[in-house]
Image (cartoon, rainbow, N blue to C red):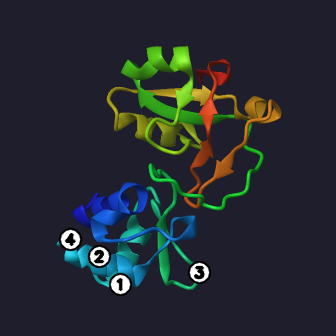
Amino acid sequence: MSKQSKFISRVLRHEPEAAGLSLLPGGWVRIEDLLQGMKHAGHCLSVQELHQLVEENDKRRFSISSDGTLIRAAQGHSVDVDLGLEAIEPPEALYHGTARSNLESIFSEGLNSGRRQQVHLSPDYDAAKRVGQRHGKPTVLRVGSGDMHRAGHLFYRADNGVWLTDMVPVQFLGFN
């Protein structure tokens, strides 16, 4: 990931003040303001380069508003943001990639959001494995999301297809 993309992730997910910004409702910022804040922080980027970065990002981390004036992180916020997502019924199974070293904690406490607002779940095994590889030797957990939903847990799908929920209790976790 480029330095600019990492900086934009930091600003839109965790630290908007690093670019002199405040997030608007829904986690949005004006593209014009983001580019100006990036310039002041030593990260110059044109509007065209920003659009290219958004389009080429393999994880689709960012969303641009339909009118093209706003940008936000699709998910992964540690700052308080209401993305305005509607709760929807998930597929029967979702997946979570993690490092093997985390399994003891996960199977004693469940999956918790940690520093982020919600737990991130992948729609397929391979995507979860790629996520897990970022944390060490990957392990993919199967989440009984259908059963969770029927038990009253809420699920949301971010703009980039990542599934979100507040936490995953141990009884809904297993291996594929």
Q: Distance of mark 1 from mark 3, alpha carbons? A: 15 Å
Q: For the point 36% across and 76% down, which residue is it?
A: 34
- The answer to whether mark 4 and mark 3 are in CB contact below 8 A is no
Report which residue position mark 3 lands on.
66
Disc count in the image? 4
Q: For the point 51% across and 71% down, which residue is it?
A: 24
> Earlier along the polypeptide chain: callout 4 or callout 3?
4
Q: Does residue 34 appear anywhere in the picture? A: yes
**Furthest residue in direction right, as rendered:** 150
Report which residue position mark 2 lands on.
37
- The answer to whether mark 2 and mark 4 are in CB contact below 8 A is yes
Q: For the point 60% across and 33% down, which residue is it?
A: 167
Q: Distance of mark 4 from mark 1, alpha carbons? A: 16 Å
- Residue 108 lies, with reference to residue 64, above or below; the image says above
Q: Quadrant of residue 137?
A: top left
- The answer to whether mark 3 and mark 2 are in CB contact below 8 A is no
Q: Quadrant of residue 51?
A: bottom left
- The answer to whether mark 1 and mark 3 are in CB contact below 8 A is no
Amino acid bearing label 4:
Ala
